[in-house]
Image (cartoon, grey):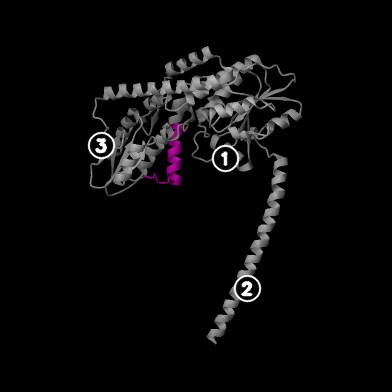
Amino acid sequence: MIELIITNRLHQKIFVGKDLPRLISMRPLTKREIAFGRKLGIRRFYLPSLTKTGSVQFFGEFDRFWDQVVKPFGPDHPFWRNVVSSKMGEWERSTAYFTLMLFTLAQKVTKESEFIVIVCSSLQEEDLCEEWGEKMGWKVYRIPYLSLPYWSRRIIQEIMNLRNFLYMSLICFYKKWFSPKYEPRRLTTKEKNLIVSLFYENCFRNGKYRDHFFGNLHNFIMQSGNSVRYLAGPLGDYRKAVKRVRDCDEISILIPYSIIPWGELIVLILKIFMRRIRFDRSTFCGMDFSRLIAWNSRRFEYSFNLDAEIYYSAIRELCENEQFIRLIQLYEGSVFERACIQAFRKYSSGQIVGYSHAVIFPLNLKIRLTDSEKEVRPEPGVLVSTGPEGKRLMAKIGKRESTRIYVIFPSAILKRQIRVLDQIFLLLLMALGALLEFWTGCLRMLKALRITALN
């Protein structure tokens, strides 16, 4: 039988039995916690793989749960610009991962007592872990680091969230300060394309821009007589990446923070902090998880919500100053992608193309669509996959029409790569043939020596 220890931090009081507990953490551990765990020999508890039947049960329960979550929200609602709408946007801290962890633990059958400590990232997670353990008939110990009244812990949690919000706001102001000034440019060609992407400093070489995801797609578009503008967010060192943008004359690259005026940025940040999305009762395996979703929707440990609103406002400003016939963007189910779709669909009448560049697997709930979600979630009108298997999985997991999913190979690059690969493959075959011939000769020699020895 599982004996569940619920806490908000690794500490000495969690030892309630003779054996060391195994660890599940819903947040990154601090250096002090890691040192403490290593000193005492606490090991992580790795969730076992679900059986085929278990996987079907989990997806069935989760889909019913998520249908309840998204039911009140239309395609233009700010919910779709909130990280919880990605289901797995915060990974270990996401609601989906939390439900998967509890569901998988419930499938574990053990006769002997097994101590498992769960380090939760919020009071809402602690409450649900306690209720789940009692529902499963486990022995539950709730041992927080500080024995304070529940109401005082709620206040502390809100204060810490405010601190995280102020820190994230400072990062936004920092990025705005070092972003180049935006100047609306009236492009002369009839057809204008907007590409939304992300870039690193090393995307710029010899005065040329090569996007990590789209390569030199802009060159192909411009060769056909159309115009291209990138709306791209820097990754890595922000100041260095922005400096490379200023030095690039090949293509127009806009930083989202450049487009939004200072006054609008301040109002936008305050608006996000004050926003409260109301969720209806949403049950997973008979337990109400709506309070956890509500808390995760206004938590500021990550910048996902701020980033999504920044992209939304940037595209709105762009579409009010310029007209685009097409939006080409990344597509892996992230929240900022839906913000771009919402803004472009509202303020422009152009086509939206999503490029699926990431690995697609069944448990990637960001790509998966439930029946109710399929009707209201903002999605590109056209999807582009990197291969036929990706197309099949996108259609299967997301219940998408295969007619709007296209497989595109960059022919010139592929031909060049195939020529190089053919030469390498030929050399490998020749080496393998020589190696096999050598080993065959050795085996024949050994066989002959063995026969001679027997005689």
Q: Which residue is mark 1?
A: 393
Residue 398 percent coordinates (x, y): 55, 34
Q: CA distance from mark 1 to mark 2?
A: 47 Å
Q: Give the magenta part as a residue range.
A: 45-64
Q: Is residue 54 magenta?
A: yes
Q: Residue furthest top?
A: 263
Q: Position of residue 383 (x, y in %)?
A: 62, 32
Q: Residues within 10 Å of mark 3 (few under 14, many from 20)?
A: some
Residue at mark 3: 141
- Label placed on residue 441: 2
Which amino acid does the dot numbered 2 rest on? Answer: Gly
Q: Quadrant of the C terminus?
A: bottom right
Q: Which mark is residue 33?
A: none
| Cα gap from disc 3 to disc 2, whole angstroms | 68 Å
Main SS category, magenta section: helix
SS of the residue under disc 2: helix
